[in-house]
Amino acid sequence: MSPDAGGGKSKTRHVSHGSYLLKGRSPHAMEDYLVSELKRVHHNELGLFAIFDGHMGHDVAKYLQAHLFDNILKEHDFWTNIEDAIKRAYEATDKVILEQSIKLGKGGSTAVTAILINGEKLVVANVGDSRAIMSKKGVAEQLSVDHEPSMEKEIIESKGGFVSKIPGDVPRVDGQLAVARAFGDKSLKRHLSSEPDITVKIIDHDVELIILASDGLWKVMSNQEAIDSIKNIKDPNSAAKILVEEAVSRKSRDDISCIVVRFS
């Protein structure tokens, strides 16, 4: 296992962020990627945070890390209609990934993205089961949607696919993929969606922190357990590391990536 960490602080409102990645015990190469940065864009400060969890190869997740936020920010109405801008950027990015499937491979990736505007407005979008949560007065609130195949069974079947339910296993699209929405996955695309669910939140003084993480964390830890584990940890890098190490201690074998953003 090889860890990686990083972080920074806002220059406007007091916002700090940190991250931590750890290779799981599975034999394949690391498939998790993340973005965690603050940048100035047109006199605004943007916090750009994302978790990308690849499957059947890491190239799609790596491509998303390099391009998805750039594609979102290039949308002409990003500042006036951010939700539509994100939806179009997700769709356009997925189209490019499918067109480049010979180069990027047949695999895919989940994604959860969070854009923080001037430390005050948070826009979360996701496809798949990487998750974002928020702590408000110490209470966990989930900001993303876990796109499980059983939840979208009728939609998948209407497109000609099926959802398997083998005893001892999780539901899977066409007996293969354990999420109903994802980037890539060309062989399954007829039955999958890459349309994100989007949540918009105002960051008021009751919000202490947000957590983004891949399913390697959420398979073994509830939202409230994650908040309780780090509520007194001021340094977000340390907090992210504590969450990942706790997931490993609970026998998570998957790759795990985690971002913690703290407000004060």
Image (cartoon, rainbow, N blue to C red):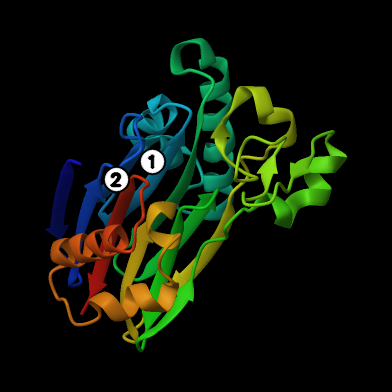
Q: Splitting the image into 4 quarters, where does residue 90 fall?
A: top right
**Mark 2 or mark 1: whose residue is earlier in sequence:** 2
The residue located at (20%, 67%) in the rendering is 239
The residue located at (39%, 25%) in the rendering is 59
Percent coordinates x, y for residue 233 in the rendering = 16, 76
Against 235, is 49 above or below? above
Say which amino acid is labelled 2.
Val
Percent coordinates x, y for residue 245 in the rendering = 22, 60
The residue located at (85%, 33%) in the rendering is 160
In what quadrant of the picture does the N terminus appear? Answer: top left
Q: Residue furthest front?
A: 167
Quick one: SS at disc 1?
helix
Say which amino acid is labelled 1.
Phe
| Of the pair 174 and 238, the residue shown nearer to us | 174
Distance CA(mark 2)–CA(mark 1): 9 Å
Q: Do the residues labelled 2 and 1 touch (CB within 8 Å)?
A: yes
- 64 on left or right of 80: left
Against 21, is 122 above or below? below
Q: Badge 2: few (under 14), some or many (20 or more) residues near its Cα, within 10 Å?
A: many
Residue 40 visible in the snapshot? yes
In what quadrant of the picture does the C terminus appear? Answer: bottom left
Percent coordinates x, y for residue 86 in the rendering = 52, 46
- Per the rendering, the mark at residue 35 is 2
Percent coordinates x, y for residue 190 in the rendering = 74, 29
Q: How many numbered markers are drawn?
A: 2
- Per the rendering, the mark at residue 121 is none
Q: Badge 1: few (under 14), some or many (20 or more) residues near its Cα, within 10 Å?
A: many
Q: Splitting the image into 4 quarters, where does residue 11 fall?
A: bottom left
Quick one: SS at disc 2?
strand
| Of the pair 117 and 79, the residue shown nearer to us | 117
| Of the pair 81 and 227, the residue shown nearer to us | 227
Q: Mark 1 points at which residue?
A: 69
